[in-house]
């Protein structure tokens, strides 16, 4: 408790810190250590110039007027800069479908940050707390991961915070004063390592980030942003070779007729809406709306729709948990391979709300708690990830599916005449590149593990997995490269 207060140089309780971070997540304030790393590539020079100017002329005077707890002005400005850029990157990606920040995005992000600060009792101190908790977690976590780090690497953030500008002399001195790290002379020079007090604080920081939903948010943000960078349509047939058959069988069971108003929740690139012909089932006299949180996937759907000259399909950006439609808008509401990414209780309630009385609500989902290691080759392949999970005492394969029974029970609670079945299909790792892209980029699975690996090693680990996959494909039989999935299909009526 004291260690956290000392770290922040502010008198906040763990509950208060958790609340600040939870508020930041809710307000879309992002200091994301995946996206910040390549910011120069994605942020236009005018945006960078505009931000540098705004920090000097607008933020510096505001911060200088604040309470003295904030630390050195240049450190505070660097924190604001990183948070504004992370926020701008995230929201630009969500709005445009690509990571390209212009000066208007930077302006909007700074306005969002200022708004957050204005609503926090601690003002700029709260933003500083957010920054310190996330960056101290990165620093201490990296030291715990490596055991020790060359002082130069620590100071420059080479391995763990390459997106930060400047040298972390201040932080290192602060951590040493608090007894969190030790610096010793080893063969190759000064070496930094974590003390027992540092380990204790790291545990506390993890607890805070977990409790505030920040870790969960990172996975979610990752899925929404990087997901769109996967060539979903090209990858899917390699990983799920009979997905088309499975989905067609499912759609065939639904009494969707010409002239109906239909919503597809989590439509992605339009595989169901366009490629598998849901638009034909609905016909030109009907209305078909595809909803998805990912702008880049919706852009792909739009491009296909225009190329095919299909007029009666609309797209809407949004999430299943908060459908942007009035009550009783649709005759049918379907979700294919998307509800396992949602809060299923909220999503189903929303689907029921927007469907007319007597209308149908249906979902097809992968099996509950799918563990990719059901493919024998993957059990060997993903061993480095499993070992990390074991080292950290974390569940392996969490968030890769709904809880057993959740889909059926939720439907039974909110709908009548519910029919539930377990149709089978195949999952294949025979194209390891496609499989890994799907798992890491597509579903953004294993983020709970990857977000604890320092930046440089995260990419090393991914490259190691790529090599391991290429190797294993030569040493396993085709039977060992596949598994049968017992999916979940459910239909009910409002
Ligand atoms: C595996 S894809 C399925 C896409 C499409 N239905 C299909 O069958 O090809 C999962 C989709 O769920 C979307 N998704 C993720 N979180 C969501 C949420 N909270 N609400 C709605 N859709 C979501 C993703 O953006 C993605 O397009």
Image: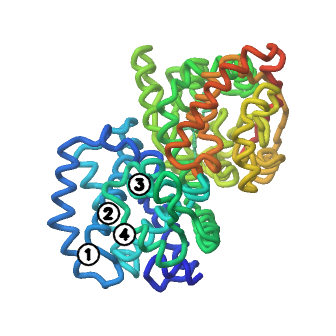
Between disc 4 and disc 1, whose residue precedes? Answer: 1
**Is 242 left or right of 466, judged from the image as shown?**
right
Residue at disc 3, secondary structure:
helix
Q: CA distance from mark 3 to mark 4?
A: 14 Å
Q: CA distance from mark 2 to mark 3?
A: 24 Å
Between disc 2 and disc 3, whose residue precedes? Answer: 2
* Disc 4 target residue: 170
| Ligand 1 placement by image quarter | top right
Q: Is residue 447 above or below residue 27?
A: above
Q: CA distance from mark 2 to mark 1?
A: 10 Å
* Disc 1 target residue: 63
Residue at 72% x, 34% y: name it: 382
Mark 1 crowdedness (10 Å alpha carbons): few <14, some 14-19, many ≥20: some
Mark nearer the viewer, 4 or 1: 4
Q: Is mark 4 within 8 Å of ligand 1?
A: no
Residue at 43% x, 45% y: name it: 35
Q: Residue furthest front?
A: 187
* Nearer the observer, 244 or 183: 183
- Give x and y (percent) for residue 410: 77, 50
* Disc 2 target residue: 80
Mark 3 crowdedness (10 Å alpha carbons): few <14, some 14-19, many ≥20: some
Is there CB contact under 8 Å for labels 4 and 2?
no
* Disc 3 target residue: 152
**Is 372 left or right of 341, judged from the image as shown?**
right
């Amino acid at each position: 408790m004291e260690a956290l207060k000392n770290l922040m140089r502010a008198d906040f309780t763990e509950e208060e810190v958790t609340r600040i971070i939870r508020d930041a997540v809710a307000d879309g304030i992002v200091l994301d250590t995946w996206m910040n790393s390549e910011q120069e590539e994605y942020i236009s020079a005018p945006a960078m110039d505009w931000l540098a100017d705004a920090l000097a002329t607008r933020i510096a005077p505001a911060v200088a007027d604040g309470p003295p707890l904030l630390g050195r002005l240049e450190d505070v400005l660097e924190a604001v800069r990183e948070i504004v850029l992370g926020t701008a990157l995230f929201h630009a990606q969500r709005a445009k479908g690509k990571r390209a920040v212009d000066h208007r995005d930077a302006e909007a992000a700074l306005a969002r940050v200022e708004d957050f600060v204005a609503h926090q009792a601690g003002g700029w101190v709260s933003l500083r707390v957010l920054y310190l908790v996330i960056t101290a977690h990165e620093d201490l976590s990296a030291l715990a991961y490596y055991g020790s780090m060359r002082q130069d690497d620590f100071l420059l953030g080479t391995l763990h915070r390459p997106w930060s500008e400047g040298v972390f002399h201040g932080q290192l001195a602060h951590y040493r004063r608090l007894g969190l790290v030790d610096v010793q002379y080893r063969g190759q020079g000064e070496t930094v390592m974590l003390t027992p007090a540092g380990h204790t604080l790291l545990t506390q920081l993890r607890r805070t980030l977990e409790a505030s939903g920040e870790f969960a948010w990172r996975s979610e943000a990752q899925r929404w942003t990087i997901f769109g960078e996967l060539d979903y349509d090209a990858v899917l047939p390699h990983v799920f070779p009979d997905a088309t058959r499975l989905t067609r069988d499912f759609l065939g069971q639904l009494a969707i007729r010409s002239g109906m108003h239909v919503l597809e929740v989590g439509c992605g690139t339009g595989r169901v809406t366009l490629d598998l012909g849901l638009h034909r089932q609905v016909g030109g006299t009907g209305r078909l709306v595809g909803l998805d949180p990912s702008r880049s996937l919706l852009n792909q759907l739009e491009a296909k729709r225009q190329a095919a000259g299909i007029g009666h399909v609309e797209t809407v950006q949004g999430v299943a948990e908060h459908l942007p439609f009035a009550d009783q808008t649709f005759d049918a509401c379907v979700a294919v391979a998307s509800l396992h990414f949602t809060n299923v209780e909220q999503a189903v309630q929303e689907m029921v709300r927007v469907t007319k009385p007597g209308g149908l609500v249906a979902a097809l989902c992968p099996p509950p708690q799918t563990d990719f290691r059901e493919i024998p080759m993957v059990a060997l392949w993903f061993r480095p990830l499993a070992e990390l999970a074991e080292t950290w005492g974390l569940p392996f394969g969490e968030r890769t599916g709904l809880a057993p029974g959740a889909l059926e029970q939720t439907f039974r609670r909110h709908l009548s005449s519910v029919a539930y079945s377990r149709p089978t299909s195949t999952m294949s790792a025979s194209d390891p590149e496609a499989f890994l892209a799907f798992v890491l980029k597509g579903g953004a699975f294993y983020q709970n593990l990857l977000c604890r690996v320092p930046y440089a090693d995260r990419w090393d680990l991914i490259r190691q997995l790529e090599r391991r996959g290429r190797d294993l494909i030569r040493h396993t039989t085709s039977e060992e490269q596949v598994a049968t999935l017992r999916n979940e299909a459910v239909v009910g009526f409002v």
